[in-house]
Image: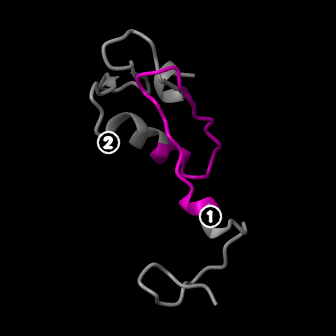
Amino acid sequence: PYRAEDETSARFVPRFNFSVDDLLRRVDFNIKGDDLIVFLHIQKTGGTTFGRHLVRNIQLEQPCECRAGQKKCTCHRPGKRETWLFSRFSTGW
């Protein structure tokens, strides 16, 4: 039986069998270095919400610059003109 975080029975059966280690894996991302996130949006997977979260809700030293009414934001590394995020929200594709 699958359990939710609060130990109640879950109502769904996972479609993918990720191990606990996979789900808890820590990945170091160096926003001030050369690391880059390439976010590929796949329709009907929650990608729009996730992409919006990447550019609007994460507490960054240098927040992304988003213009009202546009699906495009500029996400520069702190103190640089280099981008750390490549997605439809950072390039407008």
Q: Which residue is mark 1?
A: 21
The residue lying toward the viewer, choosing from 89 and 77, is 77
x%, y% of residue 76? Answer: 38, 18
Tell me: 25 left or right of 60: right
Q: Which residue is mark 2?
A: 57
Q: Is residue 46 above or below residue 58?
A: below
Q: Which mark is residue 83?
A: none
In what element is the residue under mark 1? Answer: helix
In the rendered structure, which segment of residues is drawn in magenta?
Answer: 22-50
Q: Is residue 79 above or below residue 2?
A: above
Q: Is residue 47 above or below residue 22?
A: above
x%, y% of residue 42? Answer: 65, 43
Q: Of discs 2 and 1, which sits in the foreground? A: 1
The secondary structure that most of the magenta stretch takes on is loop
**Residue type, mark 2 in image:** Asn
* Magenta span contains residue 57: no
x%, y% of residue 53? Answer: 40, 43
Answer with the quarter of the image where residue 20 lies. Answer: bottom right
Q: Is residue 75 above or below residue 45?
A: above
Which residue corresponds to the image point at 44% horizontal and 12% vertical from the top-left?
A: 82
